[in-house]
Image (cartoon, rainbow, N blue to C red):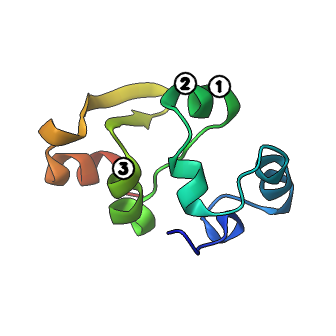
Amino acid sequence: MKKIPVSKLWGVGKQYSEKLKYYGIVTAYELTQRSDSWIQKQMSIILVEQYFDFAFGLADHIYAMTRGKIVYDCHKTKADKTQLRDSVGV
């Protein structure tokens, strides 16, 4: 992750990549080094099944939403991956 450009992450387009660069974030690893509060304040993370394992590896706490409502909420160490995958399947 230290070499993966943040622009290669799903959902990070040119504009978002420029915004992150403004904050000194150019790699996926640098993004993981930001605090939870910074990420919550500065960006939204959308988890889709194609990148489930990658996103799960980054997470400390898991939330899944359906139609704007949280349907899954727990710390990563207590997460049921099967149930979570079912919650985020597209």
Instruction: Judge depth for marks 3 and 2 and give the one in front.
Output: 2
Q: Residues within 10 Å of mark 3 (few under 14, many from 20)?
A: some
Say which residue appears at 23% left-offset and 40% top-offset: 76
Instruction: Judge depth for marks 3 and 1 and give the one in front.
Output: 1
Q: Position of residue 15 (x, y in %)?
A: 86, 54
* Res. 37 mark: 2
Does dot 1 land on a helix, a strand or a loop? helix
Mark 1 and mark 2 in contact? Answer it, CB < 8 Å. Answer: yes
Residue 74 in the figure: left or right of residue 66: left
* Res. 41 mark: 1
Residue 87 in the figure: left or right of residue 42: left
* Res. 88 mark: 3
In space, the residues marked 3 and 2 are separated at their CA atoms by 23 Å
Q: Earlier in the sequence, mark 3 or mark 2?
A: 2
Q: How many badges with numbers are in the image?
A: 3
Does dot 3 land on a helix, a strand or a loop? helix
In space, the residues marked 1 and 2 are separated at their CA atoms by 6 Å
Query: What's under tag 2, amino acid-wise?
Result: Ser
In space, the residues marked 3 and 1 are separated at their CA atoms by 23 Å
Say which residue appears at 72% left-offset and 61% top-offset: 26
Residue 58 in the figure: left or right of residue 36: left
Q: Earlier in the sequence, mark 3 or mark 1?
A: 1
Query: What's under tag 3, amino acid-wise?
Result: Val
Q: Position of residue 88 (x, y in %)?
A: 36, 49
Q: Residues within 10 Å of mark 2 (few under 14, many from 20)?
A: few
From the viewer's perspective, is residue 56 above or below residue 68?
A: below
Judge by depth and name the residue closer to the eye, 55 or 20.
Answer: 20
Q: Quadrant of residue 43?
A: top right
| Quadrant of the frame with the C terminus | bottom left
Q: Quadrant of residue 28?
A: bottom right
Does dot 2 land on a helix, a strand or a loop? helix
Query: What's under tag 1, amino acid-wise?
Result: Lys
